[in-house]
Image (spheres, helix red, strand yellow):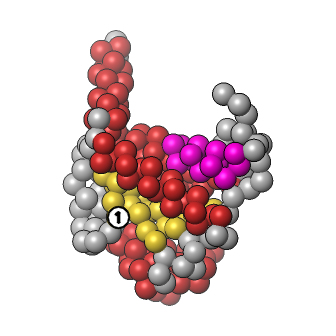
């Protein structure tokens, strides 16, 4: 009954990933971000993620792959997702407004050795934009994973824009990009522990 719809949706996902694969500039940005994360971790920094809704889940997912493990056993890597302490989230939201829930945490815990990876499919999330401003003030390098429209993201921000305006397709590629970064970082930092291919 739904087979044609299923095939259509799988094909849309494949098409978006093919468009990503064929965009050399985008692939270069992913490679650069992985290198940036490796360097930050080697220098004692941490990787900080933030997002809303499905992107919040993606932020936690990718962070967990770094802190725990991705492809093989190795020491944990310093990573966290903002907003995971519900008391902190509700206190900041109540005292300073929801638009500041991530910015306030960045002000409290971020250092110039860190990298912020903000995830927003639309580019319009006010709390993400405020987080980017807070990171800039704290001299924290920032990269945004977003979609083709880029929304209201400030100029001068490093952006990895998935070539789609479909939220589901964008999110699927964000997880793919996150997994690529995890694999590259893990294999770079722990070359001696990586299984031979």
Q: What stretch is highlighted in magenta?
A: 179-191
Where is residue 119 drawn, in percent x and y? Answer: 42, 58
Which quarter of the picture shows residue 19? Answer: top left
As for residue 168 lying within the magenta part, the answer is: no
Q: Is residue 109 visible?
A: yes
Where is residue 157 drawn, in percent x and y? Answer: 32, 69
Magenta stretch, overall SS: helix
**The C terminus is located in which quarter?**
top right
Q: Can residue 49 be seen in this view?
A: no
- The crowding category of the residue bearing disc 1, from other C-alpha atoms within 10 Å (few below 14, some 14 to 19, many at least 20), is some
Where is residue 60 drawn, in percent x and y? Answer: 58, 55
The front one of 39 and 144 is 39
Residue pictured at 42% horizontal, 40% vertical: 172
Residue under label 1, please give it: 158
* Secondary structure of the residue carrying numbered label 1: strand
Residue pictured at 45% horizontal, 49% vertical: 31
């Amino acid at each position: 009954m739904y087979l044609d719809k299923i095939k259509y949706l799988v094909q849309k996902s494949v098409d978006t990933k093919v468009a990503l694969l064929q965009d050399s500039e985008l692939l270069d940005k992913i490679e650069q971000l992985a290198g940036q994360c490796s360097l930050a971790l080697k220098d004692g920094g941490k990787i900080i993620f933030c997002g809303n809704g499905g992107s919040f889940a993606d932020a936690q997912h990718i962070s967990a792959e770094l802190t725990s493990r991705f492809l093989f056993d190795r020491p944990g890597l310093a990573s966290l997702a903002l907003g995971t302490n519900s008391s902190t989230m509700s206190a900041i939201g109540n005292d300073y407004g929801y638009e500041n829930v991530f910015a306030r945490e960045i002000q409290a815990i971020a250092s110039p050795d860190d990298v912020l990876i903000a995830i927003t499919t639309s580019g319009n999330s006010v709390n993400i934009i405020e987080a980017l401003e807070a990171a800039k003030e704290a001299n924290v390098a920032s990269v945004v994973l977003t979609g083709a429209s880029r929304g209201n993201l400030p100029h001068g921000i490093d952006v990895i824009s998935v070539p789609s305006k479909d939220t589901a397709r964008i999110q699927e590629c964000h997880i793919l990009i996150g997994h690529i970064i995890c694999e590259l970082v893990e294999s770079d930092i722990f070359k001696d522990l990586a299984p031979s291919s």
